[in-house]
Structure formats: C-alpha cells, structure tokens
Image (cartoon, grey):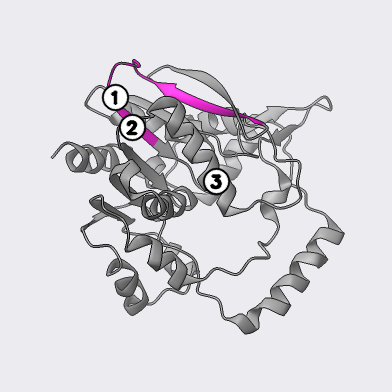
Amino acid sequence: MKSSESVFLDIRGLKVHCRCWGAAGQPKLFLLHGWMDFSASFQFLVDALRHAWHVIAPDWRGYGLSDRSGSDTYWFPDYFADLEQILAHFQPAEPVQLVGHSMGGNVAALYAGIRPERVARLVNMEGFGLNDARPEDAPQRYARWLDQLEKGARLRDYGSFDELADRLRSNNARLTPERSLFLARHWGMATAEGRVALRADPAHKLVNPVLYRLEEAKACWRRIAAPVLWIEGENSQNANDLRMSAADRDSRKAAFSDLVERIIPDSGHMMHHDQPERAAALIEDFLLR
C-alpha cells in the first residue's frame, strides 16, 4: 500500500486537509471524492496506478480531516472556490489533470467549464449531474429544508470499527473485509464514549434548498476546453437512482465537445473500490495518450 502524507491548507477561513501520495516533482493528479466519502477512499486506486504521480486528494469541507463549515448548509459554489485555492497552492501556473467521482465529478465538470483554461484533462467518474428541477418545485423544497433544519441532522455511530466495516460491506458486496476495514478506520473516529463516529458533518444529510438546474450545468459543460473521459460502472444504480433515462444521459453527454466514454465491468457506483485496477488503467491511458 502506497504511503501518503497530510497537508493542511488555510482556505477561506477553514483548515482543509489534502492527502498526498508520491513525490512533489512528479506530474500532479488531483482526485476529488464524492458525497459522504473522503480522500483516503482513493487509496486502492492510487495503489493501482502504474506511473509515478504526485496525487493530491482533498477532503471537502465538512468531510474527513477538513474543518466543518460552521453553517447548517453546504453550497456547491463553496466547493468551486475551495478547489480553486487548492489548485492555486499545488499547481498555480499549468492546467491540471482533474479526476472526480460522483459529487466530486460534478464539481470537477462544472469547474472545468467555469475555468476552462485551468483544466488540461478531465475524468468524470459517475458525476453526471442531478435530476433537473422545475421552478414550481421551489416551495416544497424550501419547506422541506426548513423542516429538516428544525429537526436537526445527525449521523449514526457504531460500536466498533469492525461494525462500521460490516456496514460498508452490506452496502457494497464487492468490498473485501480488508478494504472495508481500511475505509472504516479512515472514515471513522473513536469518541470519548467508546463509540465510532463518522468523520462527516451531519449537515451534509440535509436537502439542499437550491434547486438543481440542468441547463445551467450544461452551459458550464459546453465551455469545457479539455478532453473528457466519462466512466460508468456496468452495474451502477446511479442513473436509475436519479431516474435518468437513456435520452437524458445522451443529452448530457452531448454537452461535452470532446468526450470519450468507458464502462467498467463488474463494478457499481464505487468503481474506485470495486475495480481500482481497471479504473486506474482507464484513467492513465486517457491522461497519458
């Protein structure tokens, strides 16, 4: 298992953790994790990389070892602003190689259209956007958010790291016991009461009061200048969970001017856990071609 080191950056009033693998002089590769995930989740993918890279994977605000925002809601624009400062710290001049999974893929794809000059190549692992919303959805969404704020948010804790590992395997049968325990020990932390709590702000569980507007996302995607690799897991339920039809997926893909599509066999949504060797090979072949 490749060793990593922690780098903490002061970003917009928060201490943000970045997990780094490899030597600083090697080509840089930025990995962006998804919702309810964390930077160490990429360990198996990094282990499978065949070439020498300086890999930088931040914990988004409110996840892992990064500070929580102190607010009761997390906003997508904050991820763009945090990412911009992370890139400015590690690679201020040259365009970057950007890989994002799920929510991280959504952030990466939007950012690549917001700042097209900053991204050399983009790998989007199942970060294909959310369900489009209608203006008439707004009253119900705001009401739901207010109701959740009143009730408060909490995350379940666990009796041990082994129990958390068991929960991870119950969600993903492809996880080995060794990998699930590794993830549990990085995602969880021991509490004073002898329990294991998740390294995540419960506020991430609240519904976002701002509606997702697909046409705004497409407007960003159309401005991307970098080649894009779009990766899906063969057995992923992501598109089904989002109620995304084939026509909807095709219309989203059409917004990218230079798109290559790949499917990873025997993989669900968490392809960096299920098939890290195949995912790493696709990513490196694309970045180095």
Q: Secondary structure at mark 1?
A: loop
Residues under numbered marks 2 and 3 in contact, where contact means CB atoms less than 8 Å apart = no
Which residue occupies the extreme bottom position in the image? 136
**Residue 235 occupies which quadrant of the picture?**
bottom left
Mark 2 or mark 3: whose residue is earlier in sequence? 2
The magenta segment is 14-30
Give the left or right position of residue 157, taking residue 115 as reference: right
Residues under numbered marks 2 and 1 in contact, where contact means CB atoms less than 8 Å apart = yes
- Relative image position of residue 105 (x, y in whole percent): 42, 51
- Relative image position of residue 15 (x, y in whole percent): 64, 28
Q: Determine which of the numbered discs, if any, sits on residue 79 in the image.
A: 3
Report if residue 25 lies within the magenta region.
yes
Q: Give the labeled residue for mark 1.
A: 53
The amino acid at mark 2 is: Leu
The amino acid at mark 1 is: Trp
Residue 238 in view, yes or no: yes
Q: Main secondary structure of the magenta part?
A: strand
**Which residue lies at the image location 54% right of the left edge and 39% below the top edge?**
82
